[in-house]
Amino acid sequence: MTTDKQSIARNQNGKPPAEKSLAGNTAWAVIGNGFHAGGRFLLVIILTHYFASEQVGRVLYALAVVTPLAFLINMELRTVYITDTKNWIKAGHCLALRSVSNIILLLLLLILCAAPWPQWDRQLTILILLVGAVRMAESWSDIYWGVLQKNERMKYVSISQVLRTVAVLLFSLIIARFTDNIQWMLLGWAIITLGVLWLYDRPNADRLTPVRWLWQRQILKQLGWLAFPVGVFVALAILNQQVAQYFIQPTLGDSTVAYFGVMISIVSGITAVQNGVNQAILPRLANYFNRSRYDFWKLLGKITGISSTVMAAVLLTIWWRGALILKILYGPEYAQHAGLFVVIMGSGWIVVMGMIAGDALLACHRFKSRMTAMALGLSANAMICWYFIGEYQLAAPAWAAVVSSGIILLICAAMLAQASMKKY
């Protein structure tokens, strides 16, 4: 009877139920991450239209300081959890370890802000602490999203992203319209994130797997050792996008951070959408790698082809009307850097290809290989910025992004080819 039902499903839909489920989950992932990326994109527009470029630069700099550290300390528990095909990791273990990591993150941020940095004033340290609060709130949601993702319920993850994004956008618009206080805006983001977590994410995840703290010391230790390299990789990936701002801010000022940051934020939005696609197929890729290398490469090739086509269209659009796009979105002062916009978006194309190859490595459980690629790419990025930003200004970080992303793509592709040649 089961076979007959599957045959009927195949005949009516042209594909087996599993493939239909994968397509549906991928579609929901694209919707959710696309909505989230679009929301972040609109947030940057709100900031540039209602606040001076110096203030925008300070917020972007605070994000650049906090975000890599947050992902390093919190590790990438969600990725490790959803790719665990033996099911020895429970959501409660991830929740317990995330509790510890958030406490460590808070302590590190307090120590960092208490240090006598010459270019950090009181306003910047407050912004850094508030961004930290936002990141900690998001990290709690990540555990519940992992439960939904592992059970291939990306619909609920996407709805959560939409709810959070709409609420954050409306709140930010009200704050920007009637006040001049970015600090209240950041505090609202953290509160909204916790509210969506408690009212929506938690009950939906609990229907599939009750998420309760599990303090099993030996398992937590093993989970930490396994997840930390992935956390290092994610931190390096984010740092690779943000590292230029560490050199721009002291050399060229807060306004220049804003000019570069708004262009990089578009690349970040695109990579967020790509990450949603990759996360949706990651459990399936992990299973295919263990069962069928043909299906593994077929699915990977399909995603690579679609993503490359989309990025080619985006890059052509930026090359054709980049200045006009920047002027409409952010204003005339940002449109002066249209030539660099094309270069940065070119690096974004390479980043997307590197993300696909790198996430395929995660499906193969080659965590350290991807970390090595990212470390080498980051080193090249930082060195180019350090040596050339004084002479070539924003052109240096733009081309550094191209070189760095190219190095990461080549290494990940080579590592992936090597991993796929090994026996099951």
Image (spheres, grey):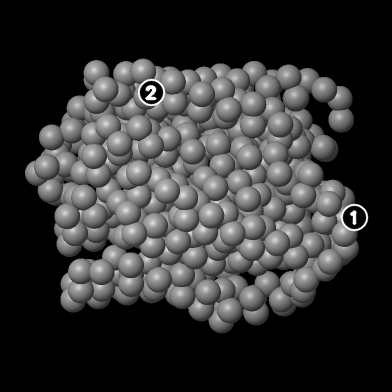
Q: Which residue is mark 1?
A: 218
For the residue labelled by badge 2, is the local secondary structure a helix, a strand or a loop? helix
In this rendering, which labeled residue sits more in front, label 1 or label 2?
Answer: 2
The single residue placed furthest to the front in the displayed view is 116
Q: Is residue 372 left or right of residue 167?
A: right
- Answer with the quarter of the image where residue 199 lies: bottom right
> Is residue 275 at all visible to an observer of this figure?
no
Which residue is label 2 attached to? 386
Residue 193: where, in percent of width, then height? 49, 71
Q: SS at mark 1?
A: helix
Quadrant placement of the C terminus = top right
Locate residue 268 relative to residue 16 in the image: left or right.
Answer: left
Q: Position of residue 385 (x, y in %)?
A: 37, 24
Q: Quadrant of residue 416?
A: top right
Residue 176 at what x, y percent from top left?
22, 69
- Residue 32's place in the image compared with 206, above or below, is above
User: At 78% from the left edge and 44% from the top edge, which residue is drawn?
Assistant: 226
Q: CA distance from mark 1 to mark 2?
A: 43 Å
Q: Which callout, 1 or 2, points at the residue further toward the start of the chain? A: 1
Up/down of 319 relative to 24, above or below: above
Q: Position of residue 106 (x, y in %)?
A: 57, 61
